[in-house]
Amino acid sequence: MELLITILILLVGWAGFEIIFYEKHKRPLTDAEIQSLANKRKRKFVNRKFTFMPRYVSVNKEFKSSLNSAGKQYFINEDLDSFPSLVGALLKGKKHEWNLEAVVKDNRITTFYTNKGNDRNSVYCFLSAEELIKMCENEGGCTILSFHNHPNAVLSASEQDYKSANYYGTAFSNAGVNYLAFVCGRGDFFPYYMKIAPTYYPENAKIENIAKENNLSYKQNYRLHRELGLIFRKHQNL
């Protein structure tokens, strides 16, 4: 009996909360709230597309040792989700820094280009940003994953890493290509930079389309507030 009373109290409390929330949020979203909802939809979309969990993967030792240090493009067909772990294993134990640029198409890695750096402390891709964009376009891809290893196994990005990533990220984004950068060490990986091309986001994340959803009815306004969340916070643009 006490359990039933407790459940009834909780249900009444929940119903009361919903009524109060509805009355306070049947108004249309403000411009700032529309922007916040757009950012939230973008983040959810990106998180669904690019979530990488460390996994145990094995690599072919012969293929690993045969990587062309002078630079070469390889054609493969690997799962996107596990690819950072695969690259971590591929670059594990390398005494010099290596760079690897991979193309994503339909959640698969279809090709990558890799080259070796001159020493243990630095590396750069022998292909230009324009050549990498062309490689992506030739594959019908929309995203480039960029990897380099730290032979000292420190899984953190340097100031120069961020500068380089920002340069490539801006160039790729302007060309409609997403860019994600990773550091690898001891078989592990660390994502440290992401730049998403504005054209990649879904239509429902565009401000103008959310504005069209807004103020159609009290019920619709309530749904948009519900999606936005109980607590309104300002978010930086993605």
Image (spheres, rainbow, N blue to C red):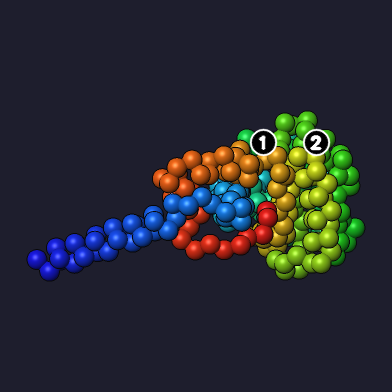
Residue 221 lies, in percent from the top left, at 47, 48
Does residue 116 appear anywhere in the picture?
Answer: no
**Residue 24 percent across, percent down from the top left:** 42, 58
Q: CA distance from mark 2 to mark 1?
A: 12 Å
Task: In the rendered view, tell whether residue 144 sits above or below residue 121.
Answer: above
Given residues 30 and 8, the one toward you in this image is: 30
Residue 217 or 175: which is nearer the viewer? 217
> Residue at label 2?
135
Total label count?
2
Q: Which residue is mark 1?
A: 105
Q: Quadrant of residue 176?
A: top right
Residue 212 image position (x, y, % from top left): 57, 39
For the N terminus, the quadrant is bottom left
Q: Is residue 129 visible?
A: yes
Q: Secondary structure at mark 1?
A: strand
On screen, 150 above or below 228?
below
- Say what amino acid the circle numbered 2 marks: Met
Q: Residue at x 83, y 46 (%)?
A: 171
Q: Is residue 151 left or right of residue 34?
A: right
In the image, taking residue 197 as reference, residue 1 lies left or right, namely left
